[in-house]
Amino acid sequence: MNNATFIQRMLMQSALRLGKAHAAHVNDGKMPSLGFVDGLKHKLLDEIVLSKIRARFGGNLRAGFVAGAACPKEIIEFMDAVGIPICEGYGLTETSPVIAMSVLGRRKAGAVGKVLNGVTVHILDSEGNPLPVGQEGEICCSGPNVMKGYHNNHDATTEVITIAPDGRSRLFHTGDLGKMDSNGFLAVTGRIKEQYKLENGKYVCPTPIEQAIGMSRFISQVVVCGANRPYNVALVVPDWLAVRSELGISTMNTSEEDLVNDSRVKGLINAEIKLNCYKIKKFEIPKAWACVAPFTAANSMVTPKMSIRRHVVMKTYDDIINGMYEGGVKAGGCLDDQQLGTA
């Protein structure tokens, strides 16, 4: 859409808006009902705009299924609007392997679906006490799908399996953070081992923040950190090709080293962080960031599954992280309280 005309942009925005409204009815299990005028507009814009996007996926794709990692809510909503609904599932090998799953006609963006029949999910606090609906805690699961234990490893088994509240069933502790809404939809919000406290005692789970910042087309990778610090900071790997294209900077005369000190780049990244963190709590938004080299398997910063090794990244860039708190990092930017907004 970067090179689209004003008319093309308006058509796309209208098509996505109506597509999203149409999908909301379908997700609720209702017959699509946009009203006569909006229904007619949606049918027309679907034909001239949205069908072209579906064609990029081959033209015959009717639905998609995601598991293994959370899919950003914005992507789910976009695909819904386009007319290719995405169903998410959640589970682990230890739970055979599904706990919850979305199905067509019963989905919610930002949630992994409802718990399977015969399976029970408990959201527990750090003391093992059940939490009320809507509160975040550890996702624990009981039911016939829960493993009996790890083969010949009693110690590892007792670390993750306890007795369920019914006093009989095996309760598996997933190590994932999540919450359940009043309609029974389960949302996974992060990993307990990644959660940390800021200096002020507030808990932070970096994954949702990283997902939000990573929605920017100018940022290819990001790691947020701030354990026992006054605020969060971010290590950012820009998509230099997209940055150069946006700012009209030639590859001939400007190196990446020059770009990290360019005020235009700093302004762009600052704006993107502010834009994409509009739903993030104010105290969670990074107040400083620094450009770093890509996280790759070659430098041991990602796993074979392309998951970022957070501890390796933070150890490697420890000096840069410290510099952001001391105000000595030149290759980065800062967001003041006014720029952070009121999230």
Image (cartoon, grey):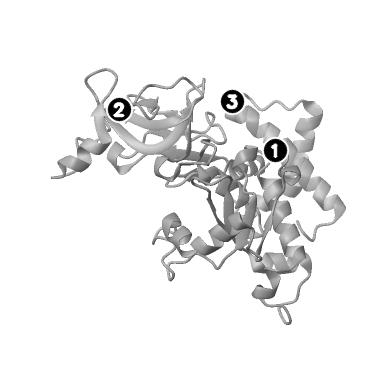
**Secondary element type, mark 1:** helix
Mark toward the start of the polypeptide (2 vs 3): 3
Residue 45, percent from left and from top: 76, 43
Mark toward the start of the polypeptide (2 vs 1): 1
In depth, the one of 148 and 288 nearer the eye is 288
Residue indicated by mark 3 = 28
In depth, the one of 273 and 81 nearer the eye is 273
Left/right of residue 276 with respect to residue 230 in the rendered view: right
Mark 3 crowdedness (10 Å alpha carbons): few <14, some 14-19, many ≥20: some
Residue indicated by mark 2 = 142
**Secondary element type, mark 2:** strand
- Spatial separation of the CA atoms under disc 1 and disc 3: 14 Å
Residue flagged by tag 3: what amino acid is it?
Asp
Image quarter in which the N terminus is found: bottom right
Asked whether residue 75 appears in the rendered view, the answer is yes
Residue indicated by mark 1 = 19
The furthest residue to the top: 166
Q: Quadrant of residue 246?
A: bottom right
**Secondary element type, mark 3:** loop
> Which of pointers 2 and 3 indicates the residue nearer the eye?
2
Residue flagged by tag 2: what amino acid is it?
Ser
Residue 134, percent from left and from top: 51, 24
Taking the spot 52% from the left edge, 45% from the top edge, the residue there is: 206
Mark 1 crowdedness (10 Å alpha carbons): few <14, some 14-19, many ≥20: many
Residue 267, percent from left and from top: 75, 58
Q: Eyeballing the image, is 272 above or below 291?
A: above
